[in-house]
Image: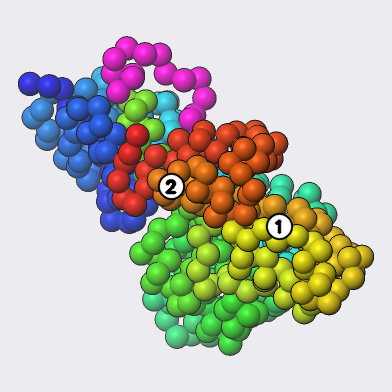
Amino acid sequence: MQDTFAIVLATRSDHMRNLALGAIGCVRVHHRRSVLIEDMDQLEDLRLPLAGVLTWVGSEELATRCRGLGKPVVNLSGRLAEVPFPSVLADHVAAGRQAGAYLLDQGHRAVAYAGLSEVNYARQRYEGIRGALAERGLEPRLLETPPRMEWVDEPQRRETVERWREALDPPVAIFCADDHIGRSVIEWSIEAGLSVPGEVSVLGATNDELACERSQPPLSSVDISSQEIGYRGAELLMRLAAGEQPPDEPVLVPPRGVVVRESSEVLAIRDPRIAEVLGFIRAHPGEAISVEQLTQRFALSRSALYRGFHDLLGRSPAKEIMRVRIQHAKTLLAASDQPLKHVAAKSGFASFQRMSQVFRRELNITPGEYRRQFRVRRGLVVR
């Protein structure tokens, strides 16, 4: 009988399910056998010949149990700063930087972080957003992590509401260490009589769709590429089982970007004229918009347009147009199988060659290479 790869993940959340989907798809592509089980207790009852284990090593106790297996183990959890196994992880610092860049692009200057703790990924996400804001001379304010509202009795609720209202000092944009914290931030902000996203703009991390859609309003979140992490984790596990040496450092998978939902879908731009121009650019990513067209359409001088963009966003209108085109192209590349020349045309580039030049200059990667980073699309793993 062919040896089995055990995928040990508690699939109660979308994130864990997506890790499992990516891993199962990878094993299937390589014509190997896998079994999905919920915890280590079930693994110890397994009566199949075991080739290796892909799991979420989120505690020292679990690390100790995995060491006793005598089989290759690959970790997918970023909770601990160090684990004694090869790891494939989300690039949490990059996720924090993407969050910071997105909130700055929305015009926010008052930014806070909720959820800093001893959990390693929470610290790394804070490090990322802090770095992104520092480039603009800003610092994120640290907020206390609010409790889950359903676990708080009435006296505590009133106290928490008052404390939360005083801490926020709106208008403010809040990046949360994960989507569950993001959901709580939305609930307590509304309970405190504040509008979301009008006075409080909220952004989560992980893009756990169930948690995001349960929020009211739905929660925007940084997509950390959960299925891709599972896929690459299974790839590494199969190589280790074949005798390959483990990598010296964790394999980091880049985030896919911000999935925008209602909780952050507002431009915090003080100048209504610049806000109108910016909204137009972002609503038409596939059009060949020029600065001259913008000055004519919105009756603004070139100097006023450049000054407004530089003061509010820190870049020129031309760079914002290009940023929007690149982002739209990245979305199409990751989420579709459209030919590259069609992606270029739909993203406002004059040709595929021009898109390739821009990708190499701005991202140090070709469009085709960028697409290959994201093999997991529409719930299916493709090669």
Where in the figure is residue 280, as x and y percent of width and height? 67, 70
The residue under the point 8% across, 29% down is 47
Q: Nearer the viewer, residue 335 or 45?
A: 335
| Horizontal side, residue 133 vs residue 58: left or right | right
Q: Amino acid at mark 1?
A: Ile
Where in the figure is residue 332, as x and y percent of width and height? 49, 51
The residue under the point 52% across, 44% down is 341
Q: Determine which of the numbered discs, if any, sits on residue 41 in the image.
A: none
- Quadrant containing the N terminus is top left
Local packing at callout 1 (Cα closer than 10 Å; few below 14, some 14-19, many 20+) is many
Q: In the image, which residues are magenta?
A: 238-256
Residue 189 to residue 375: above or below: below
| Horizontal side, residue 367 vs residue 21: left or right | right
Name the residue beneath numbered marker 2: 338
* Element type where label 1 sits in the image: helix
The residue under the point 17% across, 37% down is 35
